[in-house]
Image (cartoon, rainbow, N blue to C red):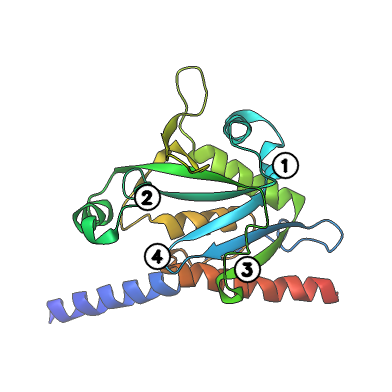
Amino acid sequence: MPGRFLIAALIGLAAALWTLTRPGDPALYPARPDEAVTVHLLDNGFHTDLAVPRAALMEGGGVLAEATASLAPGGWVLIGWGDATFYVDQSPISGRLADGARAFLKPGNPSVVMLDPQAQDPTRRFRPEDRRALRLSPAGMRALRARVQASLATDAAGRPVLAAARPGDDARFFASRETFWIGHLCNHWTADLLSAAGLPIRPWRAVTSGEVMRTADRAATLDLQTVRD
């Protein structure tokens, strides 16, 4: 009998966590129609990135501005996060299954923040169903930027640490203070950025890119209501 109660309690706890919603911040999101900063949420099927105006990342200075200034030209910057090895490697996935298992199952893996400059519209490579536009308030954009900056590791001089750069690729990968594993994946990280910007999220469900996209869909309802008001 005690075992049954324990199992029931664990099931109840799992259900509660699965449906848990971290509330948004109405002071940050949605933005008023005349002040919105547009960013784009992009989904490649299992991983999400944010496309952010380069000027918004440069504003305020600091380590993120320094990292952004080191990039190739481009008015937009794709921002992503992941395991320091698996995320950077672009070789066929069939040869990286063991490394993928390591990244998922071993706690405490080093991670990197990707900053990838885009000279043209960053959404053009994505189908309409794989992209969402989000209208952030200036304060929400600053909070999102602060969350990215807090993830960046620094050297003894307080500068960003370039961890990797791929030949023929403008993306740069900077060392992160955070660690990667199944309990804190790339989509969790993107959801955290949206949460910092004032959007409500369901943190435990954010293991998938689809849940992060649904976060944007739910937020769009709030944005539409603000426009109507």
Name the residue type under label 4. Val
Q: Quadrant of the C terminus?
A: bottom right
Q: Nearer the viewer, residue 42 or 106?
A: 42
> In this figure, which residue is indicated by the disc labeled 3?
132
Q: Are marks 3 and 4 in contact (CB under 8 Å)?
A: no
Say which label, 1 or 3, has the lower sequence index.
1
Residue shown at the point (64%, 47%) measured from the top left: 143
User: Marks 3 and 4, how far apart in space?
Assistant: 18 Å
User: Marks 3 and 2, how far apart in space?
Assistant: 23 Å
Residue 216, how many percent across, how many down? 60, 69
Say which label, 2 or 1, has the lower sequence index.
1
> In this figure, which residue is indicated by the disc labeled 2?
87
Name the residue type under label 3. Arg
Q: Nearer the viewer, residue 214 or 29?
A: 214
Instruction: Write down the quadrant of residue 186 in the picture.
Output: bottom left
Say which label, 4 or 1, has the lower sequence index.
1
Say which label, 3 or 4, has the lower sequence index.
3
Name the residue type under label 2. Tyr
Residue shown at the point (63%, 68%) measured from the top left: 132
In the drawing, what numbered circle is on residue 207?
4
For discs 4 and 1, the disc positioned in front in the rendered view? 1
Q: Is residue 139 left or right of residue 126?
A: right
Residue 210, how many percent across, how many down? 47, 72
In the drawing, what numbered circle is on residue 55?
1
Say which label, 2 or 4, has the lower sequence index.
2
Say which label, 3 or 2, has the lower sequence index.
2
